[in-house]
Structures are given as structure tokens and as C-alpha cells.
Image (cartoon, grey):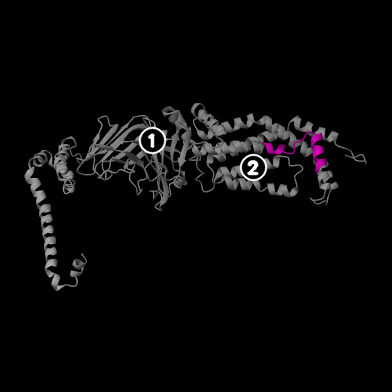
Amino acid sequence: MEDTSNGATTPNQPQKKKELSMELRLLLALVLMGGVMFTTPYFMRMVSPQPPQQQAGKSAPAAAPATPSAPVQPPAQTPTVAAAKPQQPAAAPSAPVVAAEKEQYHFLETDLYQITFSNRGGVVTHWLLKEHKAANGKPLELVNTAAKVPRPFAFYFKNQKPSRDLNQALYAMKPDADGLGVSFEFSDGNVKARKVFRFEKRRYLSKISAEVSEGGKQIPSWILWRGGFGDFAATGAASTGYVLHYDEATGKLVKNGHKDAKDGPISASGRFLFAGIEDTYFAAVFLPGNGNMDVVAFSDSTPTVVDQAEQLFAGTAVSEGTSNEIALFVGPKDVDILRAINPKLEQVVDFGWFGFLAKPLFLVVNWVTTHLIPNYGWAIIVVTVALNFLLFPLKITSMKSMKKMQALAPQIKAIGDKYKGISMRDPRKGEQNQEVMALYKKHGVNPMGGCVPMLLQIPFFFAFYKVFTVSVEMRGASWLWVADLSQPETLPIKILPIAMIVSQFVMQKMTPTAGVDPAQQRMMLFMPLVFGFMFYYFSSGLVLYYLTSNVVGIAQQWFFNRTSTAEALARSIEITAPKKKNGRK
């Protein structure tokens, strides 16, 4: 063998015949192998020409996609391929080619929706809510029509993908006779897909079915809604979008924002009562038929029709497996509507930590609007006035305490003069505090009593804040000059916040501040301005609530200051006050 390899580079005359003999043998072997390879396919065609020709004649268009894949295996296992070859065309008659010749659109309308479908991919290009308006006064568009991702209800595949791009295929489209449904079907003879949409005329509810198969075998498919969802003109629209699902096992609503999926899609599987996508006031929620669901969350960088700068928006895909038969809610996060579909859907409206107070407040305001005053602005005023009068007994206690402190002011000042000039670190400073507290205790004064009105307002403030943040009923609700109670005023100079600042000053002047350091009193004068700055860009409904509370508080303080109770409290302090040696108090 060594001689042979070397003979290729340095011929050796005595061994020339042996080397030529080896080359001839090698050449002969190659010729024989080539002959076998080239003659075998011809021999196969001569042996069994009949079956392929007969089958091809039956459905030539359907068999065409399968033809390239058939010759791949003959060199490896000729008898098996020859037997299997007639079987693939045999399936062609059960899967005829179904497709459209060009892109078409279908407009579907119910009492609540205006939806536009495209047969390219069998997707939705527009989904408008007729009863909820955009900033321009037109029906609200829920689809991000400027998104650089597949349109809603396009197919998504995780692992096993069909050989055909079904999101670019031209489906045969067939609207239902009653105008409340449409179906899409596509088949190239091997890959087959079908989508069916069916709507109700007067409900935010529909049914979607979708399935994909290849070679007669079903493939798991997901239904997409990507590129964001909801009102894209809303403040911080990108940050308010979430993918959500309700886990039946834990009884919890799980949410994922675009930040959670920034490193790639994330998935969750289990028995989910519903799953979908939401923004602040609207939701698209899929309710599975069997309870088992797989949910994918995406983070999509895309512009919108409102802002051409790309932002990250949440997107989702849902699946029941190989065949999807899913109910779908697309609409406002209205508590009554959601409860009618599924009681658990109420949790989509997130009232936050103060839900125990915010939800009852909302229900009361909603009831007043429905049954008494058909305007949310006036309903807020009525409910706020009622709340302040319900809390008036507690406020009376606070007012009494503040009135006593005002009457005790001379005695507190005398104690202060007694210990004047003492530093805070001096032990005698503790004696001063003890004398003051003893004086408070003697006359039944709570030094923190003056904080009660503000402390009472804090939980209601946060509760109303959530009501205006998550209640779709407040979105677009008008009152007098205010166009939308869920948003700040649109006037160049906002009237409600300025009126609130004035009312805060008046309340501060009317509230006794005895015993408060003068420097602290001067600082308190700035508090209304601080509150006004905070409230200037809050929702108008929240400012209206706080302004109404201040006005009612002013009226209550004025009434209390002129009652016999206030005068009696002042006299009782004067009577029990210690007298000085010169006989004067």
C-alpha cells in the first residue's frame, strides 16, 4: 500500500505494471458503480411505469407539490420507495387545492363592532368599537394598523411548522348569509388551514375556530394578537398593555408586560379560564372550550398611527392544541358586561390595593348615574357630599379637639415661655413636653385630632383614584365644561385645580392651628400650592371629588364654629384655666 500511494507522485519504473493494474481495477469499479447508479432509475421506470401515470392523471395540480419529495429516497431503498410512491398521489383527491386568486376584504358589522377581514392570511385588519370613541370622535380602533408584525388572528407555530407560510396564503373567503360570520379556507393539496369567525349581534362575544394540518396530520397552532391592543392615543399606551391569563389552579390573575418578554417570548400552560391581552379600559380575552390553554407573551417594537417612533408593546398568542374552538370577548372592561359572560372576568378590572373600598365606591357612583342623575360628574358630587356627612360624627370629634387646643393656646404659650431658650438636648425639654401632655390629658384633648379629616380622606382619595383609572364608564364621561372626567381638563387654564387650591386656603384659614409653631404655620401656607401642582394633571373626576370634599368641609367647619357646642368648649377651658398671683388669668 505504501508503494501505491507513493507511485502517484514519484513513479517507479520496475513497479509500473502493478500500479497500472491497480488503476485499471479502480477505474473499472467506478465505471461499474456509475453504470448501476445511472441504469437503476431507468430500470425502475421500465418495471413499474403504470401506477404513477394513472394517479397523476386524476389530480395533477394537487399531486404537483408532492412530486419533488418522492425521488429523494430511491437510491437508499429502491423497493420501499417504489411501493410507497403510488400512495402519496392517492391522497390527493381528499385534499383538493382551495385558494383565492387575489387579496380580498370583507366588512362585517354588528350593533357593537365594525370589523374588516383580509383573505391574505385570514386576518383582521380593523376592529372598531362603535359605542366607544377615539380622541377624534370616531369609533375606537383596537388594532395597531401601523404594526410591523402579523395582523390579529394570524397563525403562530412554536416547534412544528407547516411547509407553507399560511399568513401569506390567499384563503377562499365565504361570508355567512346572515352577515354575522365569515370563514376562511386554504389548501395546496398538502397543507390545509381553516378559520371560522362567528359573532353575536348585540353582545361583545364571538366564537373562533382554527386548525391546520399537513399531509392529513393536524399541527398545533396558536392564534395571534400582536403589536399592542386598545386605545393607542391614551397616555402611556405602551405601558398599559398586558398579556394576562387566569390560572384556575391558583385562583389568580397573572399578567405579563412587554418588559417581561423583552428577552424573547415567554409561555405558560395549564387550566386557564381565560387568557388574552388588555389595556387600561379594554380587553381581548379568549375563553377555551376545554379549559386547557397555552399562552405566549411577546414584546414587539413597533410604531403606531399616533406615534411613528417605535415603542415596545405587549402581544400574545393562544392555543388549545391541534384544534382551537374558542369563545372570544373583545370590548370594554365593564363590570356588568364581564360578569354576564363569566363572573371571574370581573377580575380583569383591577381596583388595586384599595379594591375593598374602590369597588363599592364605583358601584355606588354607577348606581346613582343609572337611577338618579344620568351624569357621572353630578353623581360624583352627590356621593362625595353623602360620604362627608356620613363621616361628620368623626369630624365633629376632631373639631372639638381643635377648638379645645385653640382655647388652651395661652396656657401652652405660658409653658413654652417657662422653658424658653432650652435646647432640644436639654433634659428639661422632656419636662416641658410632659407638662403640655398633662394639660392635654386634663382637658381631654387629642393633639392629633386635627389630622383626622385628612387621614379620613386618604383612603377615599386612593379609592377614587383607582375608580377613575380603571373604570371604562368614566372614560369619555363629560360634566359641564369637562370633556372627559378620566383625563385632565383640556382648557389652557384648568379651572378645577385652581378652585381646589382656593378652597384649600379657605379651609386652612378656618381650621384652628393653636399650638403650632409660627414657622410651621408659614410652611402650611404652601401646602395648597403643593396640592394644586399635584392635582393639576390628575383626572378631572378626582379633582372634582377633592374640591367637593373641601367645599363640604368648609361648610361643616363654618357651621360648627357657630354652634353653642364650640362656645361651650371654649368657656369650659377658660373656667378651668389656672389664675396668676395678681388675680388675672
The quarter of the image holding the N terminus is bottom left
- Few, some or many residues within 10 Å of mark 2 (<14, 14–19, 20+): many
Q: Which residue is painted at 66% across and 31% down in the image?
A: 392
Quadrant housing residue 568: top right
Residue name at image x 71 percent, y 39 percent:
511
In the rendered image, residue 440 lying in the magenta stretch gets the answer yes
Q: Estimate the x, y position of residue 579 in percent, counting from the top left.
A: 89, 38
Q: Rate crowding at label 1 as few (under 14), some (14 to 19) or many (20 or more) other CA atoms within 10 Å.
A: many
Distance between the alpha carbons at the discs numbered 2 and 1: 53 Å
Visible residue check, residue 352: yes
**Magenta range:** 433-452
| Residue for badge 2 | 504
Q: Secondary structure at mark 2?
A: helix
For this orientation, the residue located farthest to the top is 371
Horizontally, is 481 left or right of 421 in the view? left
Q: Looking at the image, which is closer to me, 183 or 8? A: 8
Q: Was residue 27 drawn as part of the magenta stretch in this picture? A: no
Front-most of 336 and 554? 336
Q: Amino acid at mark 1?
A: Met
Q: Quadrant of residue 277?
A: top left
Image x and y of residue 86, in percent: 14, 39
User: Of the residues shown, which amino acid type is indicated by label 2?
Assistant: Gln
| Disc ID at residue 293 | 1
In the image, taking residue 87 as reference, residue 445 lies left or right, namely right
- Among numbered discs 2 and 1, the one appearing first in the sequence: 1
